[in-house]
Image (spheres, rainbow, N blue to C red):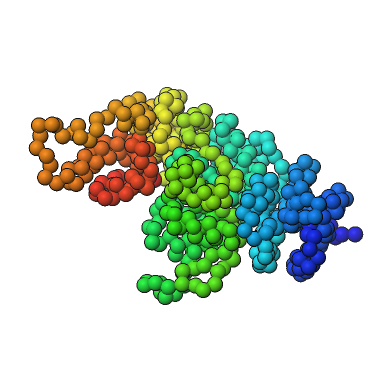
Amino acid sequence: MPNPQAARLLVIDDEPDLRTLYELTLLREGYELASAGTVAEALQLLQAERFIAVISDMRLPDGSGLDVLAWLEREQRSERVIVITAHGSAENAVEALKAGAFDYLTKPVDLRQFRGVVATATGRGAAPARRDAPVPAASRSPALARLAGESEAMQQVRALIDKVSRSMAPVLLQGESGTGKELVARAVHGQGPRAGAPFVAVNCGAIPEHLLEAEFFGYRKGAFTGAAEDREGFFQAAEGGTLFLDEIGDLPLAMQSKLLRAIQERSVRPVGAVAETPVNLRLVSATHKDLAAEVAAGRFRQDLFYRLNVIPIRVPPLRERLQDLDDIAQALLARIAGDAGVNPVPRLHASALDRLRAYAFPGNVRELENVLHRALALCGGNMLQAEDLDLPDAQGLTPAPQQAAQEPAATALLPADAPLPRDLAVYLDGVERGILERALTAHRFNRTAAGASLGLSLRQMRYRMARLGIGGPEGDGGG
């Protein structure tokens, strides 16, 4: 009889030599095993007992690993499935992850990676119960509880997080700037089996292009001028945990190619190194851009998009879940007050809440946080009134495309009878500076919101402000 205290695994492979290799490797790690060479044999064993995890080759004589996955899904079983695919079969790997596989490996299997993936799959005992319904507030983990609001949109986001946390499939978060994509990424990490391991967040748009490879993959001493010692990159720092690549759409094409290879091979080569280093991590990426449109325009690699977009999660803008405003605002106020040592935590008067609901928040939750931060700093009481909120009037809510259509072209700023500028570049810089300063003033120097009103990304806004020498209030939090 199997030892109920041991982690019992099922290995499915029709090649006796490979099956023996997997079995010997796992037996040395202290696992108990059962094995099968076909889908039929595997299903017979699965009907007879439950396992903590299943390791299956993709191609089998009477079917595939996807058939085993489909049976487990139909039976609502909790076994985590690790699929082994042929080298270079990206489509099979992605198909398996979308079908519910916990993780995948490619042949020839690196035994170090093999042991690491199996350890992750079995590290927390049986997989969490399958839940497709909204997660009740009382049963939420701390990671999920940080996502405030009970709107249908947020219920769907939580349900998706809870569902995808049982696999290692890459997740792509899509949403406007300021919607809280990093908070969602942390929830994906915190809800899964890697919660106790590192969570490394990287803003791809904030790293100079010539430093990207060294920052991502690390470097060896002497690899370039200034490399005085070996240094790990983001991939190595996230070993065993989750790497969050924010604003993935800002990566240049050359770096996209290197990132794709790292994802496919599950290994990285530090700058100046000869050999590659295996890495074991989960990848979560985020963007405010339409990556499908970026692919069509030739600015983003289609094969990388395919590998990142295994499980897409759309993070809704604040204007689509205004019913959550009270919950979000109170959660933000509690954090801001705690940081400032203010007690008790101020609350929002009904008039203040009404004023917030009447605003479209182009900067989303980040902009709401800025508004509340200023209100708390300037208000002397424990109740924030409508007049304490520094919000633009209704004219500030006009969508950017309509604004652009209504505003005169740059040439209209120079009357027809006026002399031509002696230095066109200086003249145009002055025009651009005036427009940017107007937008920043209208949005209280929130760079994200000001940029969005002009059709600019946060990265573009920062670049233009730096080029033109436009400063802003310290700690504006606008991205």
Q: Residue at x 74, y 52 (%)?
A: 65
Q: Report the side of 22 relative to 93 (left or right).
A: right
Residue 446: which quarter of the image? top left
Q: Position of residue 159 (x, y in %)?
A: 63, 38
Residue 157: which quarter of the image? top right
In the image, residue 393 above or below residue 380: above
Quick one: 158 or 356, which is closer to the camera?
Answer: 158
Q: Report the side of 474 relative to 12 (left or right).
A: left
Q: Residue at x 78, y 63 (%)?
A: 15
Q: Residue at x 42, y 45 (%)?
A: 340
Quick one: 420 or 217, which is closer to the camera?
Answer: 420
Q: Position of residue 284 (x, y in %)?
A: 55, 50
For the question of whether residue 334 can be seen, the reply is no
- Which image quarter holds the C terminus? top left
For the question of whether residue 348 can be seen, the reply is yes
Q: Report the side of 73 relative to 414 (left or right).
A: right
Q: Position of residue 209 (x, y in %)?
A: 39, 58
